[in-house]
Amino acid sequence: MEDDAYRDDQSIQDWFSDNNNGRRSYRAVCERIGLYPNGQPGQASILLGIEDFVNECVATGLPAFLIEQVSKRKQSIHPYSLASHLRFFREYLSVVDGYHDYSEHIQIFIEACRYAGFISGYFPGPMVIGLESPTAQHCEAMNRVVSYIRNGFSRTIFSRMADDRRYQSSLKEQSITRYAWALREYYCRLSVVRLDFGYRDECQGFITIDHVYAHLDALLKAMANRHPIFEHKVGYAWSIEQGTDGKGYHLHVVVFFLGWEVRDDVYKSHQIGQFWVENITSGMGTYFSCNAKKAEYRVYQGTGLFQRGDSDGWEDVVYCLLYLVKDDDQHLRMRPRGARTFSTGRAPDLADKRGRPPA
């Protein structure tokens, strides 16, 4: 098969030069993965682009390219809508390595690319070379990717991954609820601070999931080492998510403080937020104080100062905490192998009355 057969087909050239038929579809893909002309897509956006591609493969019955033999030495190649993703395969494959766990969509994409020759082992293979000017061989390989995904996505292993995620979400709900009520039973007065941590828009292009876990680790070490901001901390909970609305990677963090020591919860939340921005992320981070908005949103009413006897108030705290473990489409598509996406501190031992503060 000659590459000239590909270059002789004007319709496919129009598609990849963003002139005619492919312009609208190409722009849609650009916007979805956060890539604009002269822009750089971030890892989180690339993963969502792969997920979109897999979903499109499953939803449509068409290949990426219609390849017809018009003569003994020449082929006619015409693109369908899926073909617009081929120009992003180099970015898609940049997230592939042997050190991370992936969601079901990313996992089957990796398998399909390995089957079609785009990946050798854990890294992009020779098929990736020349993707800036795709050949007929690239088009045939992409059709194999599409076929593999379409035929394999319904396999038990991939459907089970989604089911396991929903099951884990229910276990997390039980865990965080027990943790919250244990803290309430042990301490007579608690100040509850919740923050959402993220990253500046201009930093999204180079923030990876490994950066996020490194920043989380630094934050937890500051808590464990009793940094002055966390001096009166008695508990915490956190979760890592991946936004689908341009937010990228972000964290939800709740910190419990002794209520008779930390009374101004809004001020404390801004202290922690500035610590995240300046000390943890070196200016790359952003934060949102849920405590400062508790009067505006139902889910934030579970922040602030609560007495042990305020059962209704503590129901609001639990409601606020459950947001950290909600089952929705903001799950991580990629994470360090074996890493958690949610955790809490150790619940106090209610049987040990010696260290329990007075009611």
Image (spheres, rainbow, N blue to C red):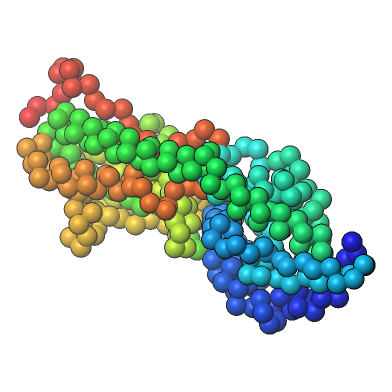
171 left or right of 259 in image: right
Q: Is residue 23 visible?
A: yes
Kindly identify the residue that appears in the image at 33 percent across and 35 percent down: 171
Relative to 38, 170 lies left or right: left
Quarter holding residue 114:
top right
Residue 184 figure quarter: top left
Q: Nearer the viewer, residue 181 or 163?
A: 163
Residue at position x 17%, y 17% in the image: 351
**192 relative to 358, above or below:** below
Image location (x, y in percent) of residue 134: 79, 65
Q: Residue at x 92, y 67 (%)?
A: 72
Quarter where residue 123 is shown: top right
Looking at the image, residue 117 sits to the left or right of residue 20; the answer is: right
Q: Position of residue 205 (x, y in %)?
A: 58, 59
Residue 274 spot, x, y in % from top left: 38, 52
Q: Nearer the viewer, residue 93 or 255?
A: 93
Decide if residue 217 is in sight here: no
